Amino acid sequence: HHPHYTSIFSLQSLGFLEALCAVLERRPPPFPALEHLELWSIDRDGCTVSVSPELSARLARSLLDRDAYPVFGRLTVRVLSQFWVYDPDLWPRADTSQRVNALKDGLVRRWREAFAAFEQAHEVKLEVFLRG
């Protein structure tokens, strides 16, 4: 899933994950040999765009059901960070990389928490990458 990163309408992209969950919940399972799912998403000013806690939990319930998806083993989440900075020139040059690294660390932590159910499943690997 590659949402349109620059559109104001990307806030409405929860519909994709809702539709994906509905498909994955079908019985019989439509993709019983599914091993890997990769989602691309947006983190805009500290908000996880296109993912909600309810949808993340619903996705986990579907994919972690070993009767439906016995070989599922990896969820990859690629995140494009979009954050607004009033005036980066106000940040001292030496401090800029520390602030950027802190933002990146916080972003990865937030997305790992959003998909924590996958991380808690021992047989499934959760990968969170920053795009760009």
Image (tube, rainbow, N blue to C red):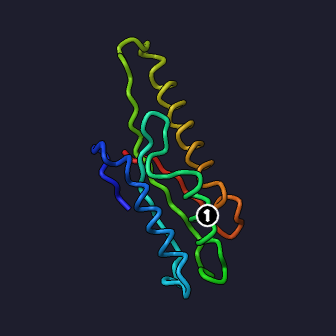
Task: Give x and y (percent) for residue 45.
Answer: 44, 33
Task: Give x and y (percent) for residue 132.
Answer: 36, 45
Question: Compared with residue 79, is residue 56 higher up or lower down, i.e. above or below?
Answer: below
Task: Give x and y (percent) for residue 126.
Answer: 59, 59
Q: Circle 1: is it few (<14), some (14-19), or many (20+) Cα within 10 Å?
A: some
Residue 110: quarter of image: top right
Residue 99 shown left or right of residue 8 in the figure: right
Question: Compared with residue 10, is residue 88 higher up or lower down, i.e. above or below?
Answer: above
**Viewer-proximal residue among 22 and 48:** 22
Seen at 51% across and 79% down, the residue is: 34
Q: Amino acid at mark 1?
A: Lys
Callout count: 1
Q: Residue furthest left?
A: 7
**Label 1 belongs to which residue?**
125
Seen at 55% across and 88% down, the residue is: 28
Residue 41 shown left or right of residue 108 in the figure: left
Q: Secondary structure at mark 1?
A: strand
**Viewer-proximal residue among 117 and 28:** 28
**Viewer-proximal residue among 123 and 24:** 24
Task: Give x and y (percent) for residue 131.
Answer: 40, 48
